[in-house]
Structures are given as structure tokens and as C-alpha cells.
Image (tube, rainbow, N blue to C red):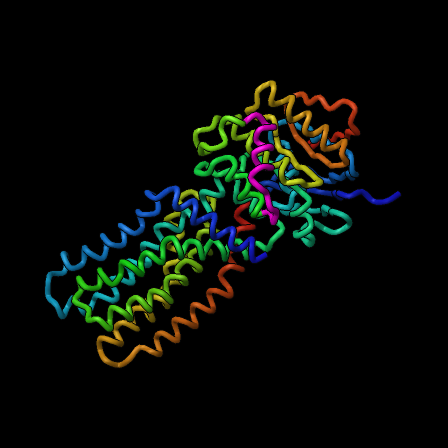
Amino acid sequence: MLKFFFTVIRRDVLLAARRRGDWLTAQFFFVMVVSMFPLGVGPEPTMLRTIGPGVVWVAALLASLLSLDRLFADDYRDGTLEQMLLSPYPTSLLTLGKAIAHWIINGIPLLVIAPVLGIQFNLPNEALWMLVLSLAIGTPILSLLGSIGAALTLGLRGGGVLVTLLILPLYVPALIFGAGAVEGILSGTGSEAQLSLLGAFLMMSLLLAPWVSAMALRVSVE
Amino acid sequence: MTPGMLIANDLACERGERLLFKNLGFELENGEALLVRGGNGRGKTSLLRILCGLSAPAAGVVRWRGEPINQAQEQYGREMSYLGHANGIKDDLTPVENLRLAAALGGRDLDMATATTALEQVGLSRCMDIPARVLSFGQRRRVALAGLMTAGALLWILDEPLTGLDVNGVAMVEQMIRDHVVAGGMVIVTTHQPLALDGLTQKTLSVGD
């Protein structure tokens, strides 16, 4: 059973490695969106510092959404999804594996790029570290909750837009606590509370999202 | 009389509020083939998807070894192979990688030699190391058929397996089905082309008359 889980992850990472163009789109999008803000808002350091954490987090949400509609759609089109659904293992294991693979492919690169982008916003060192830490806890939530939306809209026309409308509201707690944690460092009030809540939210998504997304997947494929 | 391995009782299927078929039932034993017949849009594919557990029937139940298939997903998943309209192979992987990955996802180990032999058997010995993307439609179908052979399942559910195959390919599929059934396996197949399965214990089921 564990082997199935790891095979799902290995498979998706391998497929992403074969299609680097698709994979890099979301990362470039992230860099572009974040870099537009200093250009548009102007080079005022205090202002940039205030909006920095929020901008990076919102861009991370959007970048994660951008790659979500492909999570199940490609496999659905070529029939491999059907074959995986017919495998002798629980479907929630499949959706969990695919969400984690999505995080490895799209989430981890964001963690690496984010501190570099944070410098554009004049964020101090501790705030940069907190930004990476909050994204490290937060981006798996984006992949897990996103898998629900991707499963629900599978096979629908205009599914990509629908995913955005369905899933963005669910991302709000992650955004508030994630950006709030960095804000806490900047204002000196500490960020333990926000991080704990973010962690709790991650645990909840880890428990519920694969299961809900498995049910949605079964309905969509039928 | 012992009950059959695969039993379908009173199956009904609705698509968009339209009743495709109802009161459909059959039993299938080891060493038997079931030919599903019916015109376009009569619900053959829907029936096969119900039988393999991808869709739920509007009424009725499908049993495998006495258990409803939605409660025996683990066992049924190991003993049943489904080949649908889509081939279920990834374009970015080579045929060998496709077979080995499919086996791993089904909980089986497939070594390189077995995968290579299966691909040679379906006539793909020259295309093992190129991505499936550049294969022709019929060749991809052959990769899917090689996957079927290596899966080692007891029950095969084949939806139009002959689509895109040349004359040799059709003969090969007929031989595969014959070998499988003679060895005690079960096959459920739909096709619009004539399928020469003489000498086998055959049942026929008409859908949606």
C-alpha cells in the first residue's frame, strides 16, 4: 500500500521532469507577479515592506492554482486515471499521493524562489526566514485543498476558471495566517500563534482533503 | 450448481435521465467468454464501466466471487483488467516504462525482461525505447494490449479492443482471447467487427434492444 503511494508520487515527478516547459510556467508566473508590484507601487521602502508578505503569498496561491487544472486532467484524457482508480488500493491514497507530488513539483520551488523575491520588498532577514517557513507549512495546504477543486471540475468545460472560484475562498485561512506570520515578525509581535494555526490547518487538510477529493474524483469519472 | 464467479443481477443504467437498459443479468464462469452486442449508443460502454466498477448502476448489483464489487475493490482490482477506449498509457514515457509503471500501480513487480518479451509479442520490438507520443494509434493500442497480458488478471473487460489494429493485430487479439479463455480465464468483450472465437464457450448478451 505504501509502495503504491510512493509509486504515484514518483510517477508524477517523473512525468513533470519529462515536461519541463509545463512545469516552469507556474514558477515563472510566480516570479513575474511578485516582481510587478514594486514596479507598479513605486520604490518606497516602508510601503513595500508592508505589502511584501501579502503579495508573495497571494502570488503563491495563484501560481499553485495555475498548475492545478492539470493535476488530474492529463491522466483523465489518456485513460491512466481510470486504470489507477481500478487499482486494488484506496482512491484516497491516490489523491494524497498526487497532491504531495503536486507540492513537490510546484510548492518546493516556490520556497527556494520566495526569499530572493522577498529582498525586492526590503524584508529583513528574520522576515525572509519566516516567509520561507510559513510557505513551507502553507503550500502543502494549497496542493491538498486544490486537489479537491481539480477533482470536482474534472472533465468540465472551463474547469480552470471554475477551480479558481471554488478553491480560492478555501485558501483564505492559509493566506491570513501565512502572511500574518511574516507580518508578526515585522511588527515585533511574534508569529507563534499564526504558525500554530497554519499547522493545525495543514493537519486538517491532510486528514480530510484526500478523502473528499477521492469522492469527487469517483463522481467526476462516472 | 455453484454460483458463477461474476454475476450481474438486474442491472439498469441511466444516462442523462434516459434509460439505456434494464433487467440485464448474466453469469460468467471460468473459461467462458461473453460477447456484448448492441448498436451505437445502446449502452455497451456504460455496461462495461459498470462491470469494472468505474460507474455505479442505477439498479442492480455486480458480484465477484459472491461479493458486490464495490465492497471487494482490493480483490477485484487485482483480478480484473479493463481496457477502455483510452489506452491508459502516458505519451511521455516509453512503452517499457509504461508497462512497468502500470504494473507497479497495480501492486505487481514487472522486471525488464518480462516487459520486453510482452512488447515483442505484440510486435513492438523496434519501438521499445522511444516515447509513446511518436507511436501510431494502432501501436499504442498494442502497448495497452501488452499491459493486459502482463497484468495476469483472471477477468478481462475489453471495450472495442480491435480499434485501430491491422489484420495481424486483430488475429493477435483473437489469439490472446482464445489463449486466456482456454487457460481458464474470463473475457467480456464488445466489438463491432467480427471476432473469430470458434471453439470457445461463448455467451452473447444484447444490450438495449
Horizontal placement of B144 versus A201: left or right? right
Number of disc labels: 0
Q: Is residue A53 left or right of residue A61?
A: left
Against A107, residue B182 (above or below) is above
Q: Residue at x 55, y 30 (%)?
A: B141
Quadrant of residue B41 in the image?
top right
Residue B1 location (% of width, % of height): 89, 43
Q: In the rendered image of this protein, does residue A174 appear above or below residue B33?
A: below
Considering every residue shown, the one lying at the far left of the view is: A43
Percent x, y of residue B12: 69, 42
Q: Residue at x 52, y 37 (%)?
A: B96
Regarding residue A196, the answer to whether it shows in the image is yes
Magenta segment includes B91: no
Q: Is residue A152 visible?
A: no
The image quadrant where one finds the N terminus of chain A is bottom right
Q: Residue furthest front?
A: B113
Task: Name the residue located 60 percent from the left edge and 23 percent from the top edge.
Answer: B169
Q: Position of residue A194 (x, y in %)?
A: 34, 75
| B137, above or below B103, in the image | above
Quadrant in the picture for the C terminus of chain A: top right
Observer-nearest of B18 and A158: A158
Residue B112 within the magenta-colored segment of the rendering: yes
For the record, the magenta segment spans B106-124
